[in-house]
Image (cartoon, rainbow, N blue to C red):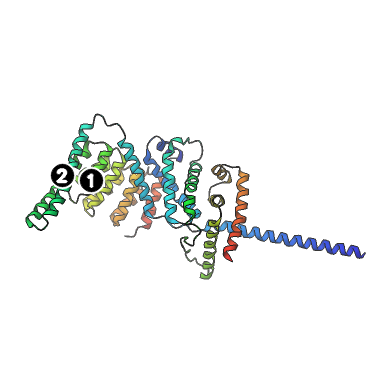
Amino acid sequence: MISDNELMFKVSRGDINKIGLLYERYSTMLYGYFFKLTGMQAISEDLVNDTFMKIIKYSKNYRGEGIFRIWMFRIARSVFADNYKKMNKMIYTDNITDNPHTNRQGIEPSEIHDKNERIHLLHKALLKLNKKEREVLVLSNFEGLKYKEIARILKCSEGAVKVRVYRAMQNLRTAYLKIQN
Amino acid sequence: MAMKRKEKIKLFQKILEKKTEDRKEVKELDEMADLYQGINQIEVPEPSASMKEKFYQQVDNIENANNSSQPISGILSFQESGWIKLAAAVLLIIGGSVLGFIFNSNIYMKKQLADLSSEINNLRSSATIAVLSEQTASVKLEAIYNAAKSTNQDTELINALYNSMVSDENSNVRLAAAQALTNYLPNENVKSMLIESLELQDDPIVQISIINILSNIKQEETIKAIQSFINKENIDSEIKNYARDIIHNTSI
């Protein structure tokens, strides 16, 4: 399989079509990132495409020394930051897309309903946090992203990431309890 | 003795308070751990199909812009002839519309208009065929987009589009040609061309596009073609996974 760095190298040399493979690899991951940060499907889709357009735009600056997805998430953060003020007026609503979990064997429907409700409230609480807190919690929850990598994405130390996660979790708990009550 | 007893009670109360605080802290930490795991369970809906479409369209636009900004000296005369034919087609369309407006009620003129419309389609086809054989990528793309408007089941044009789809060196031209050919579906011949071309493509984006076109036809034959593509060696595993997902989600 062609590595991310090889593909980016080709993109930076003008073979723009190669961005398609990177898009197939990472667009769903990025979409999940943006959806958790915004709770809005259409905006998350636009943010994914904006991120990839910026990847093409800045491809010549890509040195290929590190891990591609760290560079990609840095760009995704800046795209989110650019749109944050505009979006913030729309966030904090009840418009989070409803996606009931499917029933699973052995679990009572009422239990599933309670769980769905809890996750729904949790997402609402997450959207009440500030931009940095949301980011660190969503990033630290991604499978395969280590604290060391998150530290490089956020441009801080590994220790600072852990402190940020802890503080964000305290605020998330407060926001969650407030919504719950 | 009495003092000692009081001190003991105070100490016991302090220990009790500390334990209560500790218990409260542990409870908070448990709740936080629970919420933290919950973030992972936030269900993310599937992105819409238009997300990818928009993206690939944007990529095409960038590449078209890049191609059109490249130097074109030495091939200007070929381009000029292509543009003249295309401009003539556009003029005929406008002329046809004006005539149609003026003589709408006249049966004779209606027939004339039908002839003119057929003429325009023929001209559009021949201009496209001429351009596809010898122009730069941006001109070819323009011609293919123009050809996509044609309603003619012109075999020569279909063959020209097929040749571009399988052999043009520019993947955007191959992609555009594949998309233009979908206008002629459910023409069986075109369907076979699309199936055949999947085997010949090496660019992932064109492969994905043709897989999408074939899956949209929703016939046993097209799904089998995708399946046989998956079984081929030297195909990128990401593309194979993509094709498997498409087959899984396509109901015939």
Residue B240: x, y in percent? 39, 48
Q: Chain of mark 2?
A: B
Examine the rendered structure and indicate whether residue B104 appears above or below residue A144.
Answer: below
Crowding at mark 2 (Cα within 10 Å: few <14, some 14-19, many 20+): some
Judge by depth and name the residue closer to the eye, A39 or A20.
A39
Seen as rendered, the residue at the extreme top is B74
- At a point 80% along the width and 63% down the height, the residue shown is B13
Examine the rendered structure and indicate whether residue B161 appears above or below residue A60.
Answer: below
- At a point 20% along the width and 38% down the height, the residue shown is B82
The N terminus of chain B lies in quadrant: bottom right
Judge by depth and name the residue closer to the eye, A142 or A91.
A91
Residue B102 left/right relative to A122: left
The C terminus of chain B lies in quadrant: bottom left
The residue type indicated by label 1 comes to: Asn
Element type where label 1 sits in the image: helix
Seen as rendered, the residue at the extreme front is B102
Residue B141 left/right relative to A101: left
Element type where label 2 sits in the image: helix
Label placed on residue B123:
2
Examine the rendered structure and indicate whether residue A141 appears above or below residue B142.
Answer: below
Residue tagged by mark 1?
B146
Residue A31: x, y in percent? 45, 51
Crowding at mark 1 (Cα within 10 Å: few <14, some 14-19, many 20+): some
